[in-house]
Image: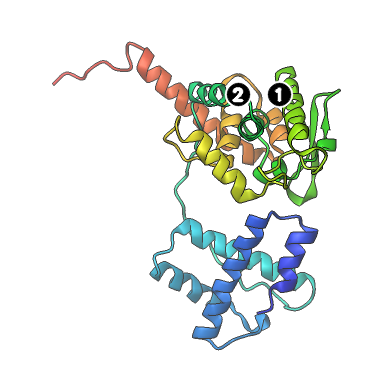
């Protein structure tokens, strides 16, 4: 199969992140290798429902998780939708393939008191690199923006008069994200430290120790390093996004407001965070209510 045009399409026209594009490439290559080895097929229009189903069975035999299989099916389905759209295939052979059942997983988040300790320790930095690390963690936590949105912010996207950041999300959709007066002061200090060290070398807000635009692996390492002393949970930029949404809910924000701040297309994507809030309420109830922990008579 020739997937290069599709990859170019989702990267340039759909605006998918580099990580997402890489995942699509890997998933489609996996299927293409399967076609060559098992069916000696090279053309997408020769793929049938039964072939796709046999691929799923092979993935199960290899021990792939249901989550992984569903992601690969989603990638393949999107690819054939694209081919159908441009007229290279008549139908989508993945259309009627059922997704594998997966257990519901609650978003991982960091406790509020732990998050405060992380930020207090980082805020004390007085050099550029240390304060840059603080700004990255602070912005991811207080705005809930995605990793891809963070690294593409330019200084011109930050409105210090209105305390708003313009971010470009999925499908190149722009939105304005507010920040507080406290963050306003943090941002000014960071910009000053950046200019002292690098001058006007980069238009991008977050830069590396060499003054270049930050990239995804750089931010991943930064977040992991910053969170490691304080939390035993998964340490990634997306965990900070989950933490933002969960803490907002726990402190009284309504779902629709959080949906807009996160840049979700629909409310269903935001509602998953209510489960974390419910679990917290259950924990508080079981710990605090006298009738919740009465021992059963033997």
Residue sitting at 73 percent across and 35 percent down? 197
**Position of residue 131 measured from the top left corner of the image (x, y, whole percent):** 64, 30
For marks 2 and 1, the one nearer the N-term is: 2
Q: Secondary structure at mark 2?
A: helix
Cα distance between the residues tagged 2 and 1: 9 Å
Q: Which residue is mark 1?
A: 186
Which residue is more in the foreground, 97 or 196? 196
Q: Which residue is mark 2?
A: 123
Residue sitting at 74 percent across and 20 percent down? 185
Mark 1 crowdedness (10 Å alpha carbons): few <14, some 14-19, many ≥20: some
Which residue is more in the foreground, 87 or 41? 41
Q: Secondary structure at mark 1?
A: helix
Q: Is residue 190 visible?
A: yes
Vertical relation: 97 (above or below) 170? below
Total labels: the figure holds 2
**Position of residue 124 measured from the top left corner of the image (x, y, whole percent):** 58, 22
Residues marked 2 and 1 touching at CB (< 8 Å): yes
């Amino acid at each position: 199969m020739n997937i290069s045009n599709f990859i170019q399409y989702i990267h340039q026209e759909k605006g998918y992140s580099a990580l997402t594009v890489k995942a699509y490439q890997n998933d489609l290559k996996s299927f293409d290798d399967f076609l060559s080895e098992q069916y000696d097929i090279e053309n997408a229009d020769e793929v049938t429902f039964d072939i796709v189903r046999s691929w799923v069975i092979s993935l199960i035999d290899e021990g792939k998780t249901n989550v992984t299989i569903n992601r690969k099916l989603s990638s393949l389905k999107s690819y054939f939708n694209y081919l159908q759209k441009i007229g290279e295939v008549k139908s989508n052979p993945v259309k009627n393939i059922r997704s594998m059942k997966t257990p519901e997983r609650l978003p991982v988040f960091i406790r509020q008191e732990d998050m405060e300790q992380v930020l207090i320790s980082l805020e004390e930095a007085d050099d550029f690199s240390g304060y840059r690390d603080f700004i990255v963690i602070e912005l991811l936590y207080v705005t809930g923006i995605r990793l891809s949105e963070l690294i593409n912010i330019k200084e011109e996207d930050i409105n210090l008069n209105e305390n708003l950041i313009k971010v470009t999300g999925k499908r190149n959709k722009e939105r304005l994200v507010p920040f507080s007066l406290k963050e306003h002061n943090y941002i000014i200090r960071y910009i000053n430290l950046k200019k002292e060290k690098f001058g006007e070398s980069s238009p991008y807000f977050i830069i590396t120790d060499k003054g270049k635009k930050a990239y995804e692996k750089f931010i991943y390492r930064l977040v992991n390093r910053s969170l490691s002393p304080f939390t035993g949970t998964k340490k990634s930029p997306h965990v900070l996004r989950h933490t933002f949404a969960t803490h907002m809910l726990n402190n009284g924000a309504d779902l629709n407001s959080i949906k807009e701040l996160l840049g979700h297309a629909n409310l269903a994507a935001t509602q998953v965070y209510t489960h974390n809030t419910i679990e917290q309420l259950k924990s508080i109830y079981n710990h605090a209510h006298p009738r919740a922990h009465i021992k059963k008579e033997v």
